[in-house]
Amino acid sequence: MSIDYLRDVKPLEDAGVTDAVIAAHVSTRTMHAMKCSESRVRLQESGAVYEDPVAGTRAGSLIDHYSGLPQGEAKSLLGWFVSHVFGNGETVSTDSYPRSTQWASVTAGMDENLQVVAQSLVDDAGGQPDLGTSVGDIRSLREAYEAEQAVAEAVAEAQASFDVNRVRYDELYNIHIAPLAVVSTADNASWVAALQAMSDNFVA
């Protein structure tokens, strides 16, 4: 997946998101949203989360990790993720901001075994095609876009100027040259005078 300035950067930029956060989002986003059905199977098969069908309780290494987290955003986000995947959720939009960066922040503190599980969920969502995107990459995209816009504006201005001059040329041609074209007796002096008149009056 290539990064497109207008699609991937400008909307967040316009919303006031910093280049550092945009780069983090683009780098960590998945190709597709995570499907809760697939994630649920992965979590159960790995032993990260399993439900007691009778009591309705959940246990596993991810639940233990959740229980050990201090109160705060990471714990709230992880709790939401588990409830969403094992509840009525359909997808987790890790392909979009801010879920992309939230997912990265939640999984960053996990142990190696849970990191493997987390990576399997990412792989199921198509991986992270733009992993490693930097602030410099975001700025380069912006600069390239702005340069393209400058060229496009210059071309548009040149075309507009040409169109104005073409209209003026046609107007003067019809006044000074066209009449001579139908007069078989027009001499060289008449043609020279007509051309000079066009030249003298070209700039209104």
Image (tube, rainbow, N blue to C red):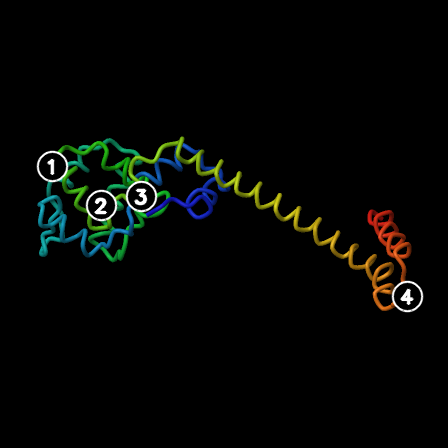
Measured from the top left, where is residue 79 in percent x and y? Answer: 24, 43
Of the two numbered discs 1 and 2 in the rendering, the one whose residue sits closer to the viewer: 2
Measure the alpha-carbon separation of dots 1 and 2. 15 Å
Q: Nearer the viewer, residue 126 or 199?
A: 199
Say which amino acid is labelled 3. Answer: Arg
Q: Residue 65's quadrant in the figure?
A: top left
Q: Which residue is mark 3?
A: 29
Instruction: Look at the numbered disc 2 and give the secondary structure of its residue.
Output: helix
Q: Which residue is mark 1?
A: 113
Of the two numbered discs 1 and 4 in the rendering, the one whose residue sits closer to the viewer: 4
Label 1: how many residues lie within 10 Å, few (<14), some (14-19) or many (20+)? few
Say which amino acid is labelled 4. Answer: Thr
40 vs 7, left or right, is left
Q: Which residue is mark 4?
A: 185
Q: Earlier in the sequence, mark 4 or mark 2?
A: 2
Residue under the image location 32 percent in, 42 percent down = 100
